[in-house]
Amino acid sequence: MKYIRHNWTIEEITEIYNRPLLKLVLDASKIHEQYHKYGEVQISSLLSIKTGGCSEDCGYCPQAARHQTNVKVEPLMKLETVLAAAKNAKAGGASRFCMGAAWREVRDNSDFDRVLEMVKEVNKLELEVCCTLGMINQYQADRLAEAGLYAYNHNIDTSEKHYTEVITTRTYNDRLNTLDHVRKAGISVCSGGIIGLGETDEDRIGMLYTLVNLPQHPESVPINALVPVEGTPLAENKRVPFDALVRMVATARILMPKSAVRLSAGRLELSIAEQAMCFMAGANSIFAGDKLLTTPNPEYNADMDMFRILGLTPKASFADRQIKNKEHVHHEPC
């Protein structure tokens, strides 16, 4: 457990991030093998249950109402539609099902009650249920926990220093407060960020610094590469170089050994060989399905072909909870 730390310095993280790439991947791979079943990858599915019309001004997001994009505003989905999508995801090998709503924050109204019902019903399918609904307070986090929510996603996006260059409608502390509410409710935390927002390497390191020095590491850390969308302020940003993505995955793995490091948005642009290097560097979770909220993603069949070629196996639902429970079993001496 010597690697599990919450007092990393910027200097230490910088040294890790700047190691020669193959050395960095090798170091991360060794740590990954100590804490995870090598070659086991969780397949997650993400469904936009309420699309567009968000009042935020996130520079990367096509769902912001103030951005002129091709995203059509759609109301909250019906329960039956969500359950059908969840069943399809499970049939496709997914063990986690995440529901995303384009809200700035959750409000205590009938829509939230409907989401709670979705959580309860998807839970019955024996899938890890995850939501990303924007900011939530403690009362709302507790209600989600009571409904059976397994995980809540709320990314910090980038470093605190660079944050205001991307978003002005909520603060960095707003995001950290939501993570605190989720943690206190006993819900698994999913939080990572996006690279390609015009940030520097120092900002990428700063983002990891924030995550690794939380009181508990997020159980899941998505590493997203910006998918530029026409009509957003960041539409002209260049795509992230492949080696930068690998560095983020490997550094996150070394800093947060127990966490799932999720290869998320931007994966469609990667070859199988490039994805293989990310898996070697410690990525052990992906989003599968042809869409991530509103942006393209590899199809299930393509991912299954990749799993076969690379010798990867899908991770079962609730595997981490089962391992954790075993660790806490008290064995009487013989």
Image (spheres, grey):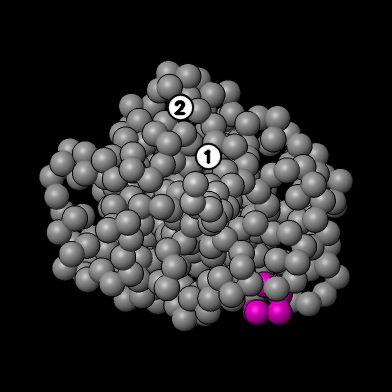
Range drawn in magenta: 137-141
Q: Earlier in the sequence, mark 2 or mark 1?
A: 1
Amino acid type at image mark 2: Leu
Query: Considering depth in this image, is 304 or 120 the residue closer to the camera?
Result: 120
Q: Could you tell me residue 186's position as x and y percent?
A: 61, 68
Q: Is residue 305 above or below residue 206?
A: above
**Quadrant for the N terminus in the image:** bottom left
Residue in the picture at 65% in, 79% down: 138
Are discs 2 and 1 less than 8 Å apart at CB?
A: no
Q: Quadrant of residue 22?
A: top left
Amino acid type at image mark 1: Gln
Query: Considering depth in this image, is 161 or 247 the residue closer to the camera?
Result: 247
Residue designated by label 1: 42
Q: Is residue 99 visible?
A: yes
Q: Secondary structure at mark 2?
A: loop
Q: Secondary structure at mark 1?
A: strand
Q: Main secondary structure of the magenta part?
A: helix
- Give the spatial CA distance, label 2 vs label 1: 10 Å
Residue in the picture at 31% in, 65% down: 5
Q: Could you tell me residue 177's position as x and y percent?
A: 53, 79
Q: Is residue 324 visible?
A: no
Q: Is residue 98 left or right of residue 203?
A: right
Indicate yes or no whether the magenta region holds residue 191. no
Residue designated by label 2: 312
Mark 2 crowd level (few <14, some 14–19, many ≥20, 10 Å Cα)? some
